Amino acid sequence: MRSLQDELSELERHSLRRELRWVDSEQDREILLDGQRVVNFASNDYLGLASHPGIGSAMKDAVDEWGAGSSASRLITGSMSPHRDLEKSIAKMKGCEAALSFSTGYAASVATVGGLVGKGDTVILDKLVHASLIDGAHLSGATVRVFPHNGMGKLERLLDGSVRGSERVLVVTESVFSMDGDVALLEEIISLKNKYGAMLLVDEAHGLGVYGESGLGLVEHLGCGEDVDIHMGTLGKAAGVAGGYIAGSQAIMDLVMNKGRAFIYSTAPPPAQAVAATKALEILTSTEGGERRKLLWDNLEKLTSMFSSTRTLTPASAIIPWMVGEVDAAVQLSNKLLEQGVFVPAIRYPTVPRGTARLRITVTANHTEDDLARLAQELGGYERY
Protein backbone atom coordinates (compact mmCIF):
# COMPACT_ATOMS: atom_id res chain seq x y z
CA MET A 1 0.00 0.00 0.00
CA ARG A 2 1.35 3.43 -0.96
CA SER A 3 1.97 5.62 2.07
CA LEU A 4 0.76 9.19 2.39
CA GLN A 5 4.36 10.35 2.57
CA ASP A 6 5.18 8.55 -0.70
CA GLU A 7 2.36 10.42 -2.40
CA LEU A 8 3.55 13.74 -1.01
CA SER A 9 7.11 12.95 -2.13
CA GLU A 10 5.87 12.22 -5.64
CA LEU A 11 4.17 15.61 -5.77
CA GLU A 12 7.43 17.16 -4.55
CA ARG A 13 9.47 15.48 -7.30
CA HIS A 14 7.19 16.94 -9.97
CA SER A 15 7.11 20.44 -8.41
CA LEU A 16 3.39 19.99 -7.76
CA ARG A 17 3.35 20.04 -3.95
CA ARG A 18 1.66 23.16 -2.64
CA GLU A 19 1.89 24.84 0.72
CA LEU A 20 -0.14 27.53 2.41
CA ARG A 21 1.19 31.08 2.32
CA TRP A 22 0.32 33.31 5.27
CA VAL A 23 -0.76 36.92 4.84
CA ASP A 24 -0.33 39.09 7.93
CA SER A 25 -1.95 42.25 6.57
CA GLU A 26 -5.20 43.36 5.02
CA GLN A 27 -5.70 42.48 1.36
CA ASP A 28 -4.49 45.32 -0.86
CA ARG A 29 -1.97 46.14 -3.59
CA GLU A 30 0.76 45.45 -1.05
CA ILE A 31 0.59 42.61 1.45
CA LEU A 32 2.80 41.08 4.11
CA LEU A 33 3.34 37.56 2.74
CA ASP A 34 5.19 35.08 4.96
CA GLY A 35 6.85 38.05 6.66
CA GLN A 36 7.88 39.79 3.42
CA ARG A 37 6.32 43.01 2.12
CA VAL A 38 5.43 42.39 -1.55
CA VAL A 39 3.46 44.00 -4.35
CA ASN A 40 0.51 41.67 -4.88
CA PHE A 41 -0.31 40.63 -8.45
CA ALA A 42 -2.22 37.52 -7.34
CA SER A 43 -5.44 38.99 -5.97
CA ASN A 44 -8.91 38.66 -7.51
CA ASP A 45 -9.94 41.85 -5.69
CA TYR A 46 -10.11 43.63 -9.05
CA LEU A 47 -11.73 46.85 -7.82
CA GLY A 48 -9.90 47.04 -4.50
CA LEU A 49 -13.07 46.63 -2.46
CA ALA A 50 -11.74 44.08 0.05
CA SER A 51 -10.26 46.93 2.09
CA HIS A 52 -13.04 49.47 1.39
CA PRO A 53 -13.90 51.23 4.67
CA GLY A 54 -17.60 51.46 3.88
CA ILE A 55 -17.88 47.70 3.41
CA GLY A 56 -15.87 47.03 6.58
CA SER A 57 -18.09 49.38 8.56
CA ALA A 58 -21.22 47.68 7.23
CA MET A 59 -19.90 44.31 8.35
CA LYS A 60 -18.95 45.58 11.81
CA ASP A 61 -22.36 47.17 12.33
CA ALA A 62 -24.05 43.97 11.16
CA VAL A 63 -22.20 41.89 13.75
CA ASP A 64 -23.50 44.22 16.45
CA GLU A 65 -27.05 43.90 15.13
CA TRP A 66 -27.21 40.27 13.97
CA GLY A 67 -24.46 38.47 15.88
CA ALA A 68 -21.58 36.42 14.51
CA GLY A 69 -23.25 33.35 13.02
CA SER A 70 -26.43 32.11 11.40
CA SER A 71 -26.57 28.92 13.52
CA ALA A 72 -28.32 26.63 11.04
CA SER A 73 -28.83 25.72 7.41
CA ARG A 74 -30.97 27.94 5.24
CA LEU A 75 -33.94 25.56 5.28
CA ILE A 76 -34.02 25.34 9.08
CA THR A 77 -33.53 28.69 10.86
CA GLY A 78 -30.47 29.99 9.00
CA SER A 79 -32.33 32.21 6.53
CA MET A 80 -32.08 35.65 8.08
CA SER A 81 -33.23 39.04 6.88
CA PRO A 82 -29.76 40.03 5.56
CA HIS A 83 -29.78 36.97 3.26
CA ARG A 84 -33.18 37.97 1.92
CA ASP A 85 -32.04 41.57 1.38
CA LEU A 86 -28.92 40.41 -0.48
CA GLU A 87 -30.93 38.10 -2.73
CA LYS A 88 -33.47 40.80 -3.51
CA SER A 89 -30.64 43.17 -4.44
CA ILE A 90 -29.02 40.62 -6.73
CA ALA A 91 -32.30 39.75 -8.44
CA LYS A 92 -33.07 43.41 -9.04
CA MET A 93 -29.59 44.14 -10.40
CA LYS A 94 -29.72 41.16 -12.73
CA GLY A 95 -33.29 41.82 -13.85
CA CYS A 96 -34.42 38.37 -12.69
CA GLU A 97 -37.39 37.07 -10.72
CA ALA A 98 -35.28 35.75 -7.87
CA ALA A 99 -31.79 34.99 -6.58
CA LEU A 100 -30.18 32.62 -4.13
CA SER A 101 -26.95 33.18 -2.16
CA PHE A 102 -24.41 30.65 -0.91
CA SER A 103 -21.51 30.53 1.52
CA THR A 104 -18.98 30.15 -1.31
CA GLY A 105 -18.81 30.21 -5.09
CA TYR A 106 -17.87 26.53 -5.02
CA ALA A 107 -21.05 25.68 -3.12
CA ALA A 108 -23.07 27.72 -5.62
CA SER A 109 -21.64 25.71 -8.52
CA VAL A 110 -22.10 22.28 -6.99
CA ALA A 111 -25.59 23.01 -5.63
CA THR A 112 -26.87 24.62 -8.81
CA VAL A 113 -25.68 22.05 -11.33
CA GLY A 114 -26.65 19.20 -9.02
CA GLY A 115 -30.04 20.75 -8.35
CA LEU A 116 -30.93 21.29 -12.00
CA VAL A 117 -29.73 18.11 -13.72
CA GLY A 118 -29.51 14.44 -12.83
CA LYS A 119 -29.82 10.98 -14.29
CA GLY A 120 -31.43 11.20 -17.73
CA ASP A 121 -30.16 14.75 -18.30
CA THR A 122 -27.03 16.05 -20.03
CA VAL A 123 -24.70 18.83 -18.96
CA ILE A 124 -22.33 20.26 -21.59
CA LEU A 125 -19.25 22.09 -20.35
CA ASP A 126 -16.66 24.30 -21.95
CA LYS A 127 -13.39 22.44 -21.33
CA LEU A 128 -11.93 25.34 -19.33
CA VAL A 129 -14.76 26.00 -16.87
CA HIS A 130 -13.88 26.14 -13.19
CA ALA A 131 -13.27 22.94 -11.24
CA SER A 132 -16.36 23.60 -9.09
CA LEU A 133 -18.61 23.42 -12.16
CA ILE A 134 -16.89 20.24 -13.34
CA ASP A 135 -17.35 18.69 -9.90
CA GLY A 136 -21.00 19.74 -9.83
CA ALA A 137 -21.56 18.14 -13.22
CA HIS A 138 -19.98 14.81 -12.26
CA LEU A 139 -21.70 14.70 -8.86
CA SER A 140 -25.10 15.40 -10.45
CA GLY A 141 -25.42 11.98 -12.07
CA ALA A 142 -26.18 13.56 -15.44
CA THR A 143 -24.35 12.59 -18.61
CA VAL A 144 -21.35 14.92 -18.90
CA ARG A 145 -20.11 16.15 -22.27
CA VAL A 146 -17.23 18.57 -22.90
CA PHE A 147 -16.52 20.82 -25.89
CA PRO A 148 -13.12 22.38 -26.67
CA HIS A 149 -12.71 25.87 -25.27
CA ASN A 150 -15.01 28.16 -27.30
CA GLY A 151 -15.42 25.34 -29.84
CA MET A 152 -18.79 26.18 -31.32
CA GLY A 153 -18.77 23.39 -33.92
CA LYS A 154 -18.35 20.70 -31.27
CA LEU A 155 -20.89 22.39 -29.02
CA GLU A 156 -23.49 22.25 -31.78
CA ARG A 157 -22.78 18.57 -32.45
CA LEU A 158 -23.11 17.80 -28.76
CA LEU A 159 -26.36 19.74 -28.53
CA ASP A 160 -27.74 18.03 -31.61
CA GLY A 161 -26.97 14.62 -30.15
CA SER A 162 -28.11 15.40 -26.62
CA VAL A 163 -31.52 17.02 -27.03
CA ARG A 164 -33.00 13.86 -28.56
CA GLY A 165 -31.93 11.58 -25.73
CA SER A 166 -32.09 13.78 -22.64
CA GLU A 167 -34.91 15.15 -20.56
CA ARG A 168 -32.97 18.36 -19.86
CA VAL A 169 -29.79 19.79 -21.38
CA LEU A 170 -27.70 22.38 -19.56
CA VAL A 171 -24.85 24.27 -21.23
CA VAL A 172 -22.27 25.69 -18.80
CA THR A 173 -19.66 28.37 -19.49
CA GLU A 174 -17.75 31.07 -17.69
CA SER A 175 -17.96 34.61 -19.01
CA VAL A 176 -14.28 35.34 -18.27
CA PHE A 177 -12.07 32.28 -17.94
CA SER A 178 -10.06 32.26 -14.76
CA MET A 179 -6.72 30.94 -16.00
CA ASP A 180 -6.55 32.26 -19.58
CA GLY A 181 -8.31 35.57 -18.96
CA ASP A 182 -10.22 35.40 -22.25
CA VAL A 183 -13.99 35.60 -22.71
CA ALA A 184 -16.69 33.21 -23.86
CA LEU A 185 -18.23 33.47 -27.33
CA LEU A 186 -21.43 34.18 -25.47
CA GLU A 187 -23.58 35.42 -28.32
CA GLU A 188 -22.78 32.32 -30.39
CA ILE A 189 -23.46 30.03 -27.43
CA ILE A 190 -26.81 31.72 -26.88
CA SER A 191 -27.74 31.28 -30.54
CA LEU A 192 -27.02 27.54 -30.29
CA LYS A 193 -28.75 26.99 -26.96
CA ASN A 194 -31.87 28.73 -28.31
CA LYS A 195 -31.75 26.68 -31.50
CA TYR A 196 -31.72 23.40 -29.58
CA GLY A 197 -33.86 24.41 -26.59
CA ALA A 198 -31.17 23.94 -23.96
CA MET A 199 -30.67 25.86 -20.72
CA LEU A 200 -27.63 28.09 -20.24
CA LEU A 201 -25.62 28.80 -17.09
CA VAL A 202 -23.07 31.63 -17.26
CA ASP A 203 -20.59 31.99 -14.40
CA GLU A 204 -19.60 35.66 -14.05
CA ALA A 205 -17.04 35.01 -11.28
CA HIS A 206 -14.36 36.99 -13.11
CA GLY A 207 -16.70 39.20 -15.14
CA LEU A 208 -18.54 40.85 -12.26
CA GLY A 209 -17.07 44.28 -11.57
CA VAL A 210 -14.91 44.16 -14.71
CA TYR A 211 -17.45 44.28 -17.54
CA GLY A 212 -20.73 46.11 -18.10
CA GLU A 213 -21.92 49.69 -17.71
CA SER A 214 -22.96 48.93 -14.14
CA GLY A 215 -20.22 46.38 -13.58
CA LEU A 216 -22.56 43.40 -13.65
CA GLY A 217 -20.47 41.39 -16.09
CA LEU A 218 -20.12 40.28 -19.68
CA VAL A 219 -23.82 39.44 -19.96
CA GLU A 220 -24.68 43.06 -19.17
CA HIS A 221 -21.93 44.28 -21.52
CA LEU A 222 -23.45 42.27 -24.41
CA GLY A 223 -27.06 42.99 -23.43
CA CYS A 224 -28.08 39.34 -23.54
CA GLY A 225 -29.42 38.82 -20.02
CA GLU A 226 -32.85 37.60 -21.13
CA ASP A 227 -31.24 34.66 -22.96
CA VAL A 228 -29.30 33.43 -19.92
CA ASP A 229 -31.22 31.03 -17.71
CA ILE A 230 -28.88 30.96 -14.72
CA HIS A 231 -26.70 33.96 -13.85
CA MET A 232 -23.97 32.77 -11.48
CA GLY A 233 -21.29 34.76 -9.73
CA THR A 234 -19.10 35.15 -6.71
CA LEU A 235 -19.01 37.82 -4.03
CA GLY A 236 -15.40 37.11 -3.08
CA LYS A 237 -13.55 38.56 -6.07
CA ALA A 238 -14.41 42.01 -7.46
CA ALA A 239 -17.08 42.42 -4.75
CA GLY A 240 -14.36 41.99 -2.14
CA VAL A 241 -16.32 39.95 0.44
CA ALA A 242 -17.24 36.25 0.23
CA GLY A 243 -19.96 33.94 -1.02
CA GLY A 244 -21.65 33.01 -4.26
CA TYR A 245 -25.02 33.57 -5.92
CA ILE A 246 -27.31 32.56 -8.73
CA ALA A 247 -30.18 34.51 -10.26
CA GLY A 248 -32.94 33.50 -12.64
CA SER A 249 -36.55 32.41 -12.55
CA GLN A 250 -38.30 31.65 -9.28
CA ALA A 251 -38.76 28.06 -10.46
CA ILE A 252 -35.01 27.59 -10.89
CA MET A 253 -34.30 29.06 -7.45
CA ASP A 254 -36.92 26.80 -5.87
CA LEU A 255 -35.54 23.69 -7.57
CA VAL A 256 -31.97 24.41 -6.46
CA MET A 257 -33.24 25.20 -2.96
CA ASN A 258 -34.97 21.82 -2.81
CA LYS A 259 -32.44 19.63 -4.62
CA GLY A 260 -29.04 21.32 -4.36
CA ARG A 261 -27.28 19.31 -1.65
CA ALA A 262 -24.53 21.89 -1.11
CA PHE A 263 -27.27 24.42 -0.31
CA ILE A 264 -29.51 22.14 1.75
CA TYR A 265 -26.79 20.72 3.97
CA SER A 266 -24.62 23.81 4.56
CA THR A 267 -24.89 26.21 7.47
CA ALA A 268 -26.00 29.59 6.17
CA PRO A 269 -23.32 32.27 5.71
CA PRO A 270 -22.94 34.70 8.62
CA PRO A 271 -25.52 37.50 8.36
CA ALA A 272 -22.74 40.10 8.51
CA GLN A 273 -21.25 38.56 5.35
CA ALA A 274 -24.56 39.08 3.57
CA VAL A 275 -24.80 42.70 4.76
CA ALA A 276 -21.24 43.41 3.62
CA ALA A 277 -21.89 41.78 0.23
CA THR A 278 -25.03 43.88 -0.25
CA LYS A 279 -23.02 47.03 0.48
CA ALA A 280 -20.25 45.88 -1.87
CA LEU A 281 -22.68 45.37 -4.75
CA GLU A 282 -24.15 48.81 -4.07
CA ILE A 283 -20.66 50.33 -4.42
CA LEU A 284 -19.69 48.13 -7.37
CA THR A 285 -22.69 49.32 -9.41
CA SER A 286 -22.40 52.98 -8.35
CA THR A 287 -20.49 55.89 -9.84
CA GLU A 288 -17.60 55.00 -7.54
CA GLY A 289 -17.62 51.49 -8.92
CA GLY A 290 -17.48 52.88 -12.45
CA GLU A 291 -14.49 55.04 -11.54
CA ARG A 292 -12.70 52.05 -10.04
CA ARG A 293 -13.49 50.00 -13.16
CA LYS A 294 -11.95 52.72 -15.33
CA LEU A 295 -8.82 52.71 -13.16
CA LEU A 296 -8.60 48.95 -13.57
CA TRP A 297 -8.74 49.09 -17.38
CA ASP A 298 -6.34 52.04 -17.43
CA ASN A 299 -3.89 49.98 -15.37
CA LEU A 300 -4.26 47.02 -17.72
CA GLU A 301 -3.49 49.21 -20.69
CA LYS A 302 -0.49 50.77 -18.94
CA LEU A 303 0.96 47.43 -17.91
CA THR A 304 0.63 45.76 -21.29
CA SER A 305 2.17 48.79 -22.99
CA MET A 306 5.21 48.37 -20.70
CA PHE A 307 5.87 44.79 -21.77
CA SER A 308 8.29 43.98 -24.56
CA SER A 309 7.24 45.49 -27.89
CA THR A 310 8.00 42.14 -29.50
CA ARG A 311 4.99 40.61 -27.76
CA THR A 312 1.86 42.70 -28.04
CA LEU A 313 -0.74 41.91 -25.38
CA THR A 314 -4.36 42.97 -25.57
CA PRO A 315 -5.96 41.95 -22.27
CA ALA A 316 -9.57 40.79 -22.38
CA SER A 317 -9.91 40.94 -18.60
CA ALA A 318 -8.01 41.68 -15.41
CA ILE A 319 -6.20 38.34 -15.81
CA ILE A 320 -3.00 38.16 -17.87
CA PRO A 321 -1.46 34.68 -18.29
CA TRP A 322 2.33 34.82 -18.68
CA MET A 323 2.85 31.48 -20.39
CA VAL A 324 5.98 29.53 -19.43
CA GLY A 325 5.29 25.88 -20.27
CA GLU A 326 7.21 23.64 -17.91
CA VAL A 327 6.34 23.48 -14.23
CA ASP A 328 9.88 23.90 -12.89
CA ALA A 329 10.50 26.98 -15.04
CA ALA A 330 7.24 28.60 -13.94
CA VAL A 331 7.97 27.97 -10.25
CA GLN A 332 11.50 29.29 -10.60
CA LEU A 333 10.32 32.47 -12.33
CA SER A 334 7.68 33.07 -9.65
CA ASN A 335 10.33 32.59 -6.94
CA LYS A 336 12.73 35.03 -8.66
CA LEU A 337 10.02 37.68 -8.76
CA LEU A 338 9.23 37.04 -5.12
CA GLU A 339 12.87 37.62 -4.21
CA GLN A 340 12.46 41.08 -5.75
CA GLY A 341 9.32 41.79 -3.74
CA VAL A 342 6.78 41.06 -6.49
CA PHE A 343 4.30 38.22 -5.97
CA VAL A 344 2.90 36.52 -9.06
CA PRO A 345 1.91 32.88 -8.47
CA ALA A 346 2.91 29.97 -10.67
CA ILE A 347 -0.15 28.05 -11.89
CA ARG A 348 0.48 24.36 -12.46
CA TYR A 349 -1.22 21.10 -13.27
CA PRO A 350 -3.93 20.10 -12.38
CA THR A 351 -5.22 23.69 -12.35
CA VAL A 352 -4.06 24.02 -15.96
CA PRO A 353 -3.18 21.27 -18.48
CA ARG A 354 0.28 19.71 -18.44
CA GLY A 355 2.81 21.71 -20.41
CA THR A 356 0.93 25.00 -19.95
CA ALA A 357 2.31 26.18 -16.61
CA ARG A 358 2.21 29.94 -16.32
CA LEU A 359 2.33 32.96 -14.11
CA ARG A 360 -1.15 34.34 -13.55
CA ILE A 361 -0.94 38.12 -13.34
CA THR A 362 -3.97 39.89 -11.93
CA VAL A 363 -4.26 43.66 -12.04
CA THR A 364 -6.45 45.76 -9.76
CA ALA A 365 -7.70 49.32 -9.63
CA ASN A 366 -5.47 49.94 -6.60
CA HIS A 367 -2.15 49.25 -8.32
CA THR A 368 0.00 52.31 -8.86
CA GLU A 369 1.98 53.12 -12.00
CA ASP A 370 5.15 52.36 -10.02
CA ASP A 371 3.78 48.91 -9.16
CA LEU A 372 3.10 48.20 -12.81
CA ALA A 373 6.52 49.47 -13.92
CA ARG A 374 8.20 47.31 -11.29
CA LEU A 375 6.47 44.17 -12.54
CA ALA A 376 7.22 44.99 -16.18
CA GLN A 377 10.88 45.59 -15.35
CA GLU A 378 11.24 42.33 -13.44
CA LEU A 379 9.58 40.35 -16.25
CA GLY A 380 11.50 42.20 -18.95
CA GLY A 381 14.08 39.44 -19.44
CA TYR A 382 11.57 36.62 -19.65
CA GLU A 383 9.58 36.13 -22.84
CA ARG A 384 6.23 34.36 -22.93
CA TYR A 385 5.80 31.48 -25.31
Image: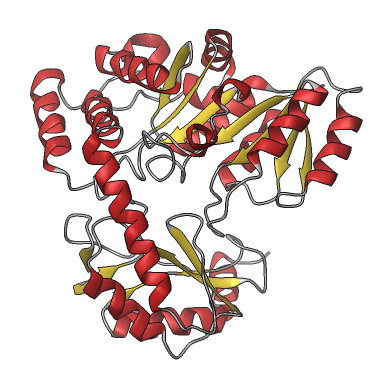
- Is residue 138 visible in this depiction of the protein? no
The residue at 53%/57% (across/down) is 181
Q: Is residue 113 left or right of residue 197?
A: left
- Residue 261: horizontal and vertical position, in percent? 55, 23
- Tell me if I can see residue 131 in this picture: yes
Closer to us: 36 or 183: 183
231 over 72 or under it: above or below: below
On the rendered image, what quadrant is the N terminus found in? bottom right
Residue 329 is situated, as x and y percent measured from the top left of the image, at 54, 84
Which residue occupies 24% across, 45% down? Answer: 49
Q: Quadrant of the C terminus?
A: bottom right
Q: Could you tell whether 369 is left or right of 332 in the image? A: left
For the residue pair 10 and 27, the one nearer the viewer reads as 27
- Where residue 333 appears, x then y in whole percent? 45, 83
Is 196 left or right of 244, judged from the image as shown?
right
**Quarter-of-image position of residue 244:** top left
Q: Is residue 255 above or below residue 103?
A: above
Instruction: Please report the residue visible at 54 percent of the width from the left and 84 percent of the height from the top.
Output: 310
Of residue 238 and residue 344, the one placed in the foreground of this image is: 238
Q: Nearer the viewer, residue 308 or 86?
A: 308
Q: Is residue 209 left or right of residue 57?
A: right
User: Where 206 sits versus 267, above or below?
Assistant: below
Q: What scheme was used to colour the molecule?
A: secondary structure
Residue 229 percent location from the top left of the image: 61, 22
Which residue is found at the position 71% from the left and 52% from the top? 149
* Residue farthest toward the bottom in the current orientation of the protein: 381
